[in-house]
Structures are given as structure tokens and as C-alpha cells.
Amino acid sequence: MTNVLSSLKVIARPEIVKKPPVLQKRLKLIEKLEQQLEMVECLIAGTEFECFKDKTVKDPETGERKKVKKRCAVRPWYYESEDHYYLEIKQGIRVLELDKGKQAIDVGEREKIPETIRVIIDAVEKGELDHLLIVDKKAAKASNKASKKADKSKS
């Protein structure tokens, strides 16, 4: 080695340990919950909520790729029924079943939604919803097939 390289500490390549997939799902759910929190705070304040996403676009003239902010639509996870608010936690298009047969959280007044979302974010950070985030794909497919067969037999 040369004098310049001898000043560096050279080691064998360390083994890269893969992170569990639940960590990525946790981070994504927290990101979506923070988006919902921002949306409901805008609702309470009476301002318009805007969400932007970075998109790479190719310039037709120069052929150069540029990142452009594009407005995206976000659907609320909360809803109102007779001046009473409810909140659902979603992973993709699937509503998480928090308890057997129960997907919604009874929030009450609109002003309590941000507090409820903060509690959920704290629970996700502590890993309390990990069992709901990891779905066995084979078991989910089997249950979907079974429910479809049951629907066909009723017809």
C-alpha cells in the first residue's frame, strides 16, 4: 500500500444484515398517518389541504430528466355520521381490523381526531400494530378463495 492509503483503516467487508420488513411498513404507515393528521388540522383550521409528490419527468426537447412536484389526491381515513366522527387505519386499500370484526375508532368530536391520530402514531412507533401490518399472503389468498366459494354456493 502507498503512504496515502496506509493512513486508512482497511477491513474485510462486513455482512449486511437485512432489516425486518415490518420496519418499512411501520415507517410508511407513520408517514400516511402524519399526512392524515395534516389533513384534519387543515379541516379544523378551515384551510385547503394540498399534497405534493415528486415525479421524474423527461423534457421532450432536451431529453433531460427533471423532478417536478405533482399534486396528489389523498382520501381521508376519517368520516362523519350524524355529527359524530370515526377513524379507520388503512394499509394500502385494506382497512386494518383492530379487533375481531371492528375496523373503526369512535373519535366523537372533530377536534379530537388529531389527538387520536397522534396516539395511533405513538402505538405504531412502539410496534403495537405490527401483527396487523404483516399479513400472510398465502393465508389471505386462501381466505379470499374460501369466501368466494361460499358466495357462489349461496347463489
Image (cartoon, rainbow, N blue to C red):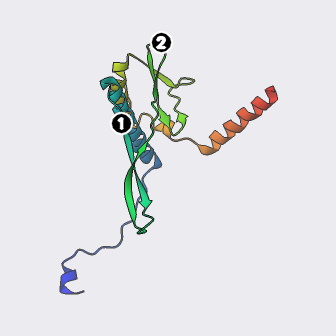
- In front: mark 1 or mark 2? 2
Please tell me in which quadrant of the rendered image residue 143 appears: top right
Secondary structure at numbered mark 1:
helix
Task: Decide if residue 16 is on the left or right side of residue 147.
Answer: left
What residue sits 39% from the left and 44% below the top? 27
C-alpha separation, residue under disc 1 versus residue under disc 2: 26 Å
Residue type at tag 1: Glu
For this orientation, the residue located farthest to the bottom is: 2
When the figure is inspected, residue 60 is found, relative to residue 38, above or below; the finding is: below
Give the numbered dot on residue 82: 2
**Could you tell me which residue is drawn at 33 percent across and 19 percent down?**
111
Q: Amino acid at mark 2?
A: Glu
SS class, disc 2 = loop
Report x, y in % for residue 139.
64, 41
Q: Residue at x 37, y 57 (%)?
A: 67
Q: Is residue 138 visible?
A: yes
Read off the residue under disc 1. 34
Quadrant showing the C terminus: top right
Q: Position of residue 49 (x, y in %)?
A: 36, 34
Question: Which residue is more in the foreground, 130 or 49?
Answer: 49
Instruction: Look at the image and tell me in which quarter the N terminus lies.
Output: bottom left
26 is higher (above) or lower (below) than 13: above
Is the residue under label 2 in contact with that under label 1 (CB below 8 Å)? no
